[in-house]
Image (cartoon, rainbow, N blue to C red):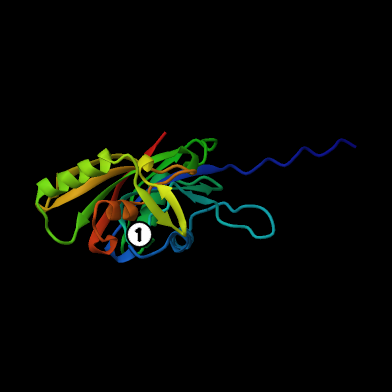
Amino acid sequence: MAASPPPIPPARQRLRVTFARGENVRYVGHLDMVRTWERIIRRADLPIAYSEGFNPRPRLTFAAALPVGCTSDHEVLDVIMSPPCDLAEARRRLGWVAPAGIHVVDVVEVPYSVPALQTQTRAAEFVITPLADEPIEQAQARARTLLDAASIERTRRDKQYDLRPLILDAWAETGEDGRARIGVRLKAEESSTGRPDEVAAALGWNPSAVKIHRRKILFA
């Protein structure tokens, strides 16, 4: 008797979701945000694929965790669907069920075989705005001092490290409200990631007295 042909694997689709995070979810940690998106996708009744093994998990991955206390215009996650679904319908459903503070910006399909998001992430751009007004000239001086530093020793989790190599650029700018703020571009790779709250401290600001907003994630 001829052997039965191997089963045909189910069709799979990788969707890349771009979303923004507002003020009312700025204190939601990364693991809670992962669980939130699992619930969003289930509520949207989309055919998310699950991992195999004893503890199957929804197959979704984030580009880069957003530090607690930050807002963002540019958060990115990949989710595997099986079977594939209609893009326009997926975006409509996700936008409909997303809770307040999470705004679905775009949903696109990317090749299933593309490398994991985390391996493609290279940098992130943040804007740091002090709660107390200060002249733009003073903000410019802070940015120059930051870039001119040969090293910036910081301590995190009882370990010392040099923050300076993680700062790719820094500049002062004026926001739409007319207030001075500082933009920074930080490394965001698997092995080395700059934290914007540590940069705020290095600028001479109390991290609890600034607002930090991620403007975009930069990929390879």
Left or right of 87, for residue 126: left
Left or right of 57, for residue 194: left
Q: Is residue 16 above or below residue 37?
A: above
Q: Position of residue 213 (x, y in %)?
A: 27, 53
Q: Mark 1: give few (<14), some (14-19) or many (20+) Cα within 10 Å.
A: some
- Mark 1 lies on residue: 96
Q: Position of residue 104 (x, y in %)?
A: 34, 53
Q: Nearer the viewer, residue 132 or 28?
A: 132
Is residue 46 something that shows in the picture?
yes
Q: Nearer the viewer, residue 65 or 105?
A: 65
Q: Assign the C terminus to one quadrant of the image.
A: top left
Q: Nearer the viewer, residue 30 or 172?
A: 172
Look at 55% across and 35% down and name the residue there.
Answer: 113
Secondary structure beneath label 1: helix
Image-quadrant location for residue 170:
top left
Type of amino acid under label 1:
Trp
Look at 35% across and 56% down and name the residue there.
Answer: 95
Q: Assign the N terminus to one quadrant of the image.
A: top right
Q: Is residue 127 above or below residue 206?
A: above
Q: Is residue 184 above or below residue 2?
A: below
Look at 59% across and 57% down and name the residue there.
Answer: 57
Q: Position of residue 193 (x, y in %)?
A: 42, 46
Look at 16% across and 44% down and name the residue there.
Answer: 141
Image-quadrant location for residue 210:
bottom left
Q: Position of residue 156 (x, y in %)?
A: 43, 57
